[in-house]
Image: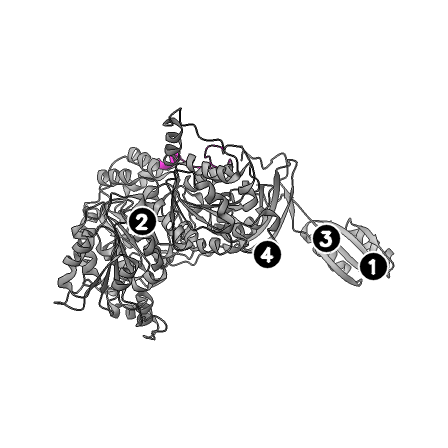
Amino acid sequence: MSERASVPAEEEQTDEEPTEEQEPITTGAQSVVRALENAGAEYIFGVQGGAIMPVYDALYDSDITHVTMAHEQGASHAADAYGIVTGDPGVCFATSGPGATNLVTGIADASMDSDPMIALTGQVPTDFVGNDAFQETDTVGITQPITKESYFASHSDTVGNDVSEAFALADAGRQGPTLVDLPKDVTQGETDVEPAAPSTPDTYDVPEEADDEDVQEAADVLADADRPVVLAGGGVIKADASNALREFAMEYEIPVITTMPGIGSFPEDHELSLEWAGMHGTGYANMAITNTDCMLAIGTRFDDRLTGGVDSFAPDADIVHVDIDPAEISKNVYADYPLIGDARAVLRQLFDAMPRAPDVDEWREQCQDWKDEYPMSYEMPDDEPLKPQYVVETFSDVTPDDTIVCTGVGQHQMWASQFWEYTEPRTWVSSHGLGTMGYGVPAAIGAKLAAPDQEVVCFDGDGSFLMTVQGLSVAVRENLDITYVILNNEAVGMVRQWQDGFYEGRRMASEYPWIPQFDKLAEAFGARGFRLEEADDVEDTIQAARDYDGPSVIDAHIDPGENVFPMVPSGGDNGLFALEEDHLEML
Amino acid sequence: MPGPAPDERMRPEGRRNSQGIRVDPEAEVTHEPRQAVLSALVKHRPGVLSEVSGLFSRRQFNIESLTVGPTSEEDTARMTILIEEPEPGIEQAKKQLQKLVPVISVMELEPEAVRRELALIKVGGEKPDDVNAVAEMYGGQAVDASTDSVTVEITGSKQKIDAAVEAFRQFDVQEIVRTGAAALERGPKTLDKDD
């Protein structure tokens, strides 16, 4: 992962025509922009404002493309999605005070999902800091807990170095967000000091390979296992280890389960794939993860939505835990065989260290039986009401494998992850750990700019879409060919589902009977709008939306009573997933 | 969705405890909290203390005391942190601390490490000689005196200071201030940057 960061920076230096020497810098702001250029930044997602104006002024002369967002939250989500799709830190800008606080949700989101991102915020001049000046807020204090590090730039001569270091740190080791707070006097101040090349702080270690003896021990345990599984987390994708995972699993024929952020790390159409486990994961993945006797878990932090109650999580399993962050080892679930290192490097080590393939014929048969017993399915009426799963499945069938799917958060997100077939890494762009409703609209913007040649689809909910709908103006202005599909059930559906399941159907503040007509709203923004109500129209509507060159919005009015299954209730036992409402009462 | 109901499925025998550690299904295993002294070298710069204390509070590590001060090197400060946690929590606290960018190195000190705290105790000035005598019993001394008050200084282990504070209750105690522990490993062992 660290090599990704250094590549653009090196190219910048070596490909430079000798005649095109960079202008010497004269201000802190220019040094900030120069640092971003050196680091290889292509895009900045941001919103202007008083305290950050000097930096924007320096951007006037830069080749970096600035995408003006409609809201700072959108800037941070777009940068986050850009980081997921490219693997390089996405960059977002905001001014001080409300600009910075509006970024916070997206920074926290990136932190929870280990997405590489750098946020630069304007700040009131140093002399005013602490005086409750206009648009002052303690941005470093607010963001310290949700970044790898938040920097307060203290001098014009060093502000460029701060940005270089923050950029490198966001990308290094376990990726994540960093922030540099830029007081206006620091960016306006004179300097001719060129920023240093991006490098991580001297206190920051990035492990590469795991200890060979530990690897051998883990490989021996895996080879001896009767019921082994691989659990591939988001770290596999972050480390560009998807190929190494495929080689490993296919060579030793070990079934693969992914976490939600790990979707795409292993092809879901492969016979070894059990798709993803957890609260709304497949029945077969949850059966396998519960009954395994040896789990090779890679790049996962054992989130509670994955494990359910830890007391019943993989209770018979020896756990080999590969992670680049030592603090994840035995944080939530005890690791019998911890391997600290880069996922790709350690997978190669394990590949070489395996003494033989485990004897898993019987176990694979068992997994196949579970696939037959618990197929992912839904009831399809003759016509109305429209089923959300059908919309997702139909869309998945007609699009190329490298199509990028973005989502908001809620029921639609689960259907999009369950009924779309993912085969490639970096094609699933979602908000997992933080669970940020409103993530989808701006994330699709970042994803499309990151991968202009790939099709981008955003599934959203009516509630989620409304939270960041203003981002549609950006997609229209930038003429981004994105298809938004709103799985519209006129409710915050997941909350409504929980109320029906766990709160005796008392639907407090979860139904949205007053929502706008999204097809018309889309047209008002300058996008194409479609209204979809019948199953018979799904294919044609999808085709029309895909054919339109620019952002389009399909307002799909789905069965408002449809719920997400399978379901493991919060803190429950993964093996006891409910397949229908009645099962919830048995648990 | 089709498939056998929850109560018709195969079930594994095992079990984990709330810390995710596999346990004997028959026996109840809990980790008792223990006290640990963590010593951390950190970059001496603004915001470090809030970063460290914020980490401890947001991850719900039970912190008893935290002291911070300069070291022999200008750009480095040392923090001594007393925490009380069950075993996995102590390990987790060390790793999370190590992850903070301004933290150079972290180690847990041996239980027999040298640990010292300081207390300043202000009592009424009626019996200065008696106050002095008690202070001397605890190896302390008076550091300020007026007609109405005497302030004494006591240094030592937590237990010694607890005992001293108790002893001074016979006087008219007006104010007490105590520091947390500062600690160093016994013998030649040090917490180097290379650790």
2 vs 3, front mark:
2
The foreground one among A37 and B155 is A37
* Residue drawn at point x = 46 percent, y = 34 percent: A199
Residue type, numbered disc 4: Asp
Residue type, numbered disc 1: Ser
Query: Upstream in the sequence, badge 3 or badge 1?
Result: 3
Q: Name the residue under label 1.
A: B149
Q: Mark 4 points at which residue?
A: A132
Estimate the x, y position of residue A161 in percent, counting from the top left.
Answer: 51, 36
How far apart, in angstroms, are the residues tagged by discs 4 and 1? 41 Å
4 vs 3, front mark:
4
Q: CB under 8 Å between callouts 2 and 4? A: no
Residue type, numbered disc 3: Ala
Residue type, numbered disc 2: Glu
The foreground one among A244 and A417 is A417
Estimate the x, y position of residue A172 in percent, counting from the top left.
Answer: 42, 39
Q: Mark 3 points at which residue?
A: B119
Q: CB under 8 Å between callouts 2 and 1? A: no
Q: Mark 1 lies on which chain?
A: B
* Predominant SS along the magenta part: loop
4 vs 1, front mark:
4
